[in-house]
Amino acid sequence: MPGRHVTDHQMRLYMKYRQTDTLPVAAAKASFASTAYRLEKDRRLPSQKKGARGKISSEWARFRHPALSACVFLILGIAQ
């Protein structure tokens, strides 16, 4: 998704405004709008969510082939 990430401070503001305002109004007051419906599903703070990097790198490690690694090392001139 393009744009800036929602900060913990914005999320706390959103949760505070959500107690009295509707979802679009609370999101606008917290300075974000398009992600409000997604944030309603998972109300954890952004700092508490695990990033996708760990999952991608673990999947890459599971599916990579030893011959492919050897070719990359050969091309880059790195000794194994």
Image: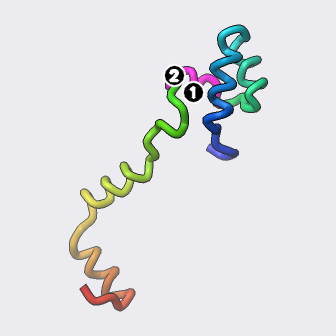
Q: Is residue 42 left or right of residue 36?
A: left
Nearer to me, 20 or 36: 20
- Mark 1: amino acid: Arg
Q: Secondary structure at mark 2?
A: helix
State which quadrant residue 10 falls in. top right
Q: Disc 1, disc 2: CB below 8 Å?
A: yes
Q: Secondary structure at mark 1?
A: helix
Picture coordinates of residue 56, whole percent (x, y): 38, 53
Which quarter of the rendering shows the C terminus?
Answer: bottom left
**Which residue, given by chain and number where applicable, does mark 1 sit on?**
38
Picture coordinates of residue 49, whole percent (x, y): 47, 37
Region rendered in magenta = 35-42
Q: Residue at x 36, y 87 (%)?
A: 75
Relative to 70, is 33 above or below?
above
Q: Residue at x 71, y 16 (%)?
A: 17
Spatial CA span between label 1 and label 2: 6 Å
Quick check: is 74 in the magenta stretch?
A: no
Q: Residue at x 64, y 38 (%)?
A: 6
State which quadrant residue 29 falls in. top right
Nearer to me, 16 or 57: 16
Q: Among all residues in the image, which is located at the extreme left?
A: 66
**Which residue, given by chain and number where applicable, does mark 2 sit on?**
41
Q: Residue at x 38, y 52 (%)?
A: 54
- Mark 2: amino acid: Lys
Quick check: is 38 in the magenta stretch?
A: yes
Q: Residues within 10 Å of mark 1 (few under 14, many from 20)?
A: few
Picture coordinates of residue 48, whole percent (x, y): 47, 36
